[in-house]
Image: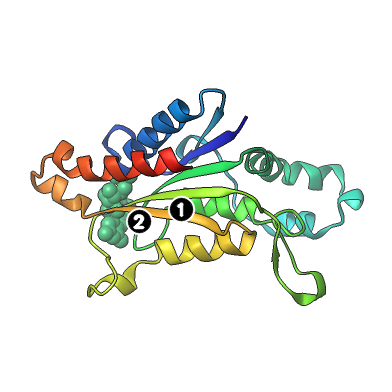
Amino acid sequence: MSTLLHIDSSPLYGRSVSRQLTGAFVTQWKSSHPDGTVVDRDLNATSIPLVTAEWVGAAYAPEEARSPQQKEVLAISDALLAELGQADEYVIGVPMHNFGVPSVLKLWIDQIARVNRTFSYANGTPKGLLTGKKATFIIATGGVYDAQTRMASFNFVEPYLRSVFGFLGVTDATFLTAGGTAALNQGLDRDAFLAPHLQVVQSHAQTV
Ligand SMILES: Cc1cc2nc3c(=O)[nH]c(=O)nc-3n(C[C@H](O)[C@H](O)[C@H](O)COP(=O)(O)O)c2cc1C
């Protein structure tokens, strides 16, 4: 029985393209995994603290030497790591904000990138510890950042996610992008815009 962790990070809810597409992925995944479990983590409804000096001190202290306060500082990180560890697959909705990932997603990444939990530097070599997972990232961007276009080098979303998740051990990652959502604000029909993206997402969800 497999578990899917479904993460969203768009503040726009009903108007969000990435949320609609991750929703379609989940619906399809449920129908192909009738015994599977879906865990929803809405980052816009989760209070995630900033990384502080106390947090870094607690994360780098040996587990058995942590004070009760240090354990408390890491409690949210521990809970988010437990979700990641228990799931076999991830689907993560990502709106492009200012050419990068939204701040709530960065806060989450800062909590789950933990030494000796999701990565290690044994013998000075980085090793990802989050292995055996499959991830699908569904990205929505107002502009178009396809390779070979003038704007391609402005896209810090996919290269960043590929690097950071690869570093953590998640190398089986698929990136599906709905580019050009700004046209929806200029009168482009939403259903017509979404139809090809829904098809790509649904057929990918059938294969994972
Ligand atoms: C705060 C904010 C910043 C944005 N920055 C960019 C940007 O740098 N480049 C871009 O192409 N679109 C940008 N957009 C547009 C979004 O990427 C676009 O609306 C996309 O559909 C967001 O995903 P969502 O519909 O799931 O929220 C921005 C939107 C917001 C709200």
Residue at numbered disc 1? 103
Residue at numbered disc 2? 97
CA separation, marks 2 and 1? 8 Å
Residue shown at 85% from the left, 42% from the top? 68
Left or right: where 56 falls relative to 136: right
Left or right: where 103 falls relative to 89: left
Q: Secondary structure at mark 2?
A: loop
Q: Nearer the viewer, residue 69 or 107?
A: 107
- Residue 164 lies, in percent from the top left, at 56, 62
- Residue 189 lies, in percent from the top left, at 11, 40
Left or right: where 200 falls relative to 124: left
Does residue 64 sit above or below 47 in this rendering?
A: below
Q: Is mark 2 within 8 Å of ligand 1?
A: yes
Residue shown at 33% from the left, 74% from the top? 153
The kind of residue tagged 2 is His
The kind of residue tagged 1 is Ser
Q: Is mark 1 within 8 Å of ligand 1?
A: no
Does residue 141 sit above or below 71 in this rendering?
A: below
Report which quarter residue 115 is drawn in: bottom right
